[in-house]
Image (tube, helix red, strand yellow):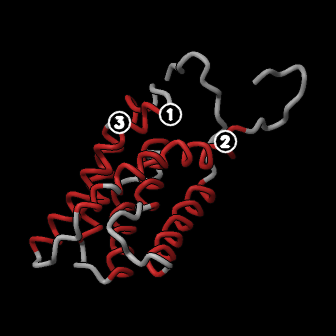
Amino acid sequence: MIMRPGQQLLLPANPAFIWFSLLGALMLNMLMNIGLWGREAWMPDLLVVALVFWSVHQPLRIGVGVAFAFGLAMDVHQGALLGQHALAYTVLGYFAIFMHRRLLWFGVPTQAVQVLPLFLCAHVLVLLVRLASGGTFPGWPVFLAPFIEAALWPVASVLLLAPQRRAPNPDDNRPL
């Protein structure tokens, strides 16, 4: 693949780091759900950000099946309708893989704008399944969460790509 001008050549992603970051995002989601605010409608889903990030950057390692499994874990943790988050995460993973080649050609702020509809779609799917199963409408702040997740995209890009940006053996004779 031809790289954008000025884009840094990255090292291969470590599979252990990918799984550690996904499990860490799952644990942070669980801690936020039982923390100070509880499960507020406006709280961002950090696992969604990590899943979309790795589905875009490593589509052969993190796919729809992984998204489905993490979705089931979130359903069990939140006591939600089994499959509610699994459906949303699966659709999210599919569309992230679908657009990953195009998305990587843009800069990080533009990527954040382009993943916003994905995050919005995931929250709408969860909301529709919740309402169809007889749940209550959580309020309009539920539509604030995708915007917060899109705002977290640059932070996730910096943090999750940091191990790949270091030079393997830096020296003065090798500029890469």
Q: Are marks 3 and 2 in contact (CB under 8 Å)?
A: no
Image position of 39 (left or right of 172): left
The percent coordinates of residue 8 (x first, y second) are 64, 27
Mark sitting earlier along the chain (1/2)? 1
Task: Specify the label residue 18 is tagged with.
Answer: none
Residue type, label 1: Val
> Where, by quadrant of the figure, is residue 24 drawn?
bottom right
Q: On residue 108, which mark appears? A: 1
Query: Counting other residues with Cα less than 10 Å from the Cα at mark 3, is it few (<14), some (14-19), or many (20 or more)?
Result: some
Closer to viewer: mark 1 or mark 2: 1
Quarter location, residue 40? bottom left
According to the picture, the residue beneath numbered tag 2 turns out to be 164
Instruction: Say whether residue 175 is left or right of residue 116.
Output: right
Contact? badges 3 and 1 (CB < 8 Å): no
Q: 97 and 109: which one is in front?
A: 109
- Residue identified by numbered label 3: 114
Image depth: mark 3 or mark 2 in front? 3
Who's the residue at 35% across and 57% down the image?
145
The answer to whether residue 48 is above or below residue 113 is: below
